[in-house]
Amino acid sequence: MSDPKGKSGASGSEGPVPKAVVTRLSLYLRELEHLVRDGHSTISSSQLGARLGFTDAQVRKDLAYFGHFGYPGIGYRCEELIAEIKRIMGTDQQWAVALVGVGNLGRALLGYRGFQQRGFRLVAAFDTDPRKIGDCIEGVTVYHLDQLPEIAQRETIRLALLAVPATQAQIVAERLAAAGVEGVLNFAPVTITLGEQVSQIGVDLAIELEQLSFSVANRESAAAPGEPPDAAADA
């Protein structure tokens, strides 16, 4: 049984935590931080859900994967829940992160200040272009990819951003895994396959735009609730 502040494991009592739940945890965390900055000390599940477009039941169900955090008659204490979500997400610590691929996207990622604010510190960048080796971009040194094992061990790098061409993504991802990297955020427009010991998430901006265009294109043509599309068209 978990204690009142919810120290249960990350898998919850119902098996592995769904990806959608983890995504919503990030949204809850940011909203709670906004609330604290605005001077709020407590919030109810219905209030938190309403600010993000979720039901109060959804909020409670998501948090219940990890324990019990609310207080009768009070709701959630914002500062306390922020600390608990950061613990769950692993962002109550600093993470050393590497970037592989110092092209246009890679340079933009190096200049993004949000990583440091969320506990992710870019400590090294890697490329194979001899013209880039030794450069210092936004305070981060660019090393040759062959130096990856050495630098990864020295800096205790466990996470990496992959911003290389699609044709090189799988090979480079395997080199990251071999160097001891445990998590890869892949920006290359291709699916990579790694062993179970390495977590990976793909970020394909074109796919995200496709999802957005689908939503906009189908907003007005959506069938009425309970009707199949062609039935709506024939009406």
Image (cartoon, rainbow, N blue to C red):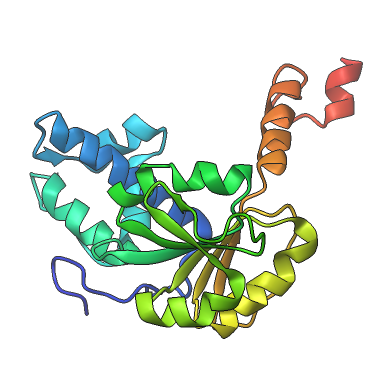
Question: Where does residue 2 sit, x and y in percent of width and height?
Answer: 20, 75
Please identify the quarter of the rendering in which residue 7 is found.
bottom left
Asked whether residue 70 appears in the rendered view, the answer is no
Q: Is residue 176 left or right of residue 166?
A: left
Asked whether residue 126 appears in the rendered view, the answer is yes
Q: Is residue 174 left or right of residue 6?
A: right
Q: Is residue 8 left or right of residue 205?
A: left
Q: Is residue 36 left or right of residue 108?
A: left
Image point (8%, 45%), residue name = 73
Q: Nearer the viewer, residue 172 or 140?
A: 140
Q: Nearer the viewer, residue 66 or 39?
A: 39
Quarter in which the N terminus is drawn: bottom left
Question: Where does residue 77 sit, x and y in percent of width and height?
Answer: 11, 48
Q: Nearer the viewer, residue 55 or 205?
A: 205
Image point (37%, 51%), residue name = 139
Question: How many labels, in total?
Answer: 0
Question: Where does residue 51 sit, x and y in percent of width and height?
Answer: 33, 30
Quarter in which the C terminus is drawn: top right
Image point (11%, 40%), residue name = 42
Q: Is 73 drawn above or below residue 5 in the view shown?
A: above
Question: Where does residue 189 sit, x and y in percent of width and height?
Answer: 73, 52
Please identify the quarter of the rendering in which residue 185 is found.
bottom right
Image point (32%, 76%), residue name = 9
Q: Is 153 drawn above or below residue 91 in the view shown?
A: below
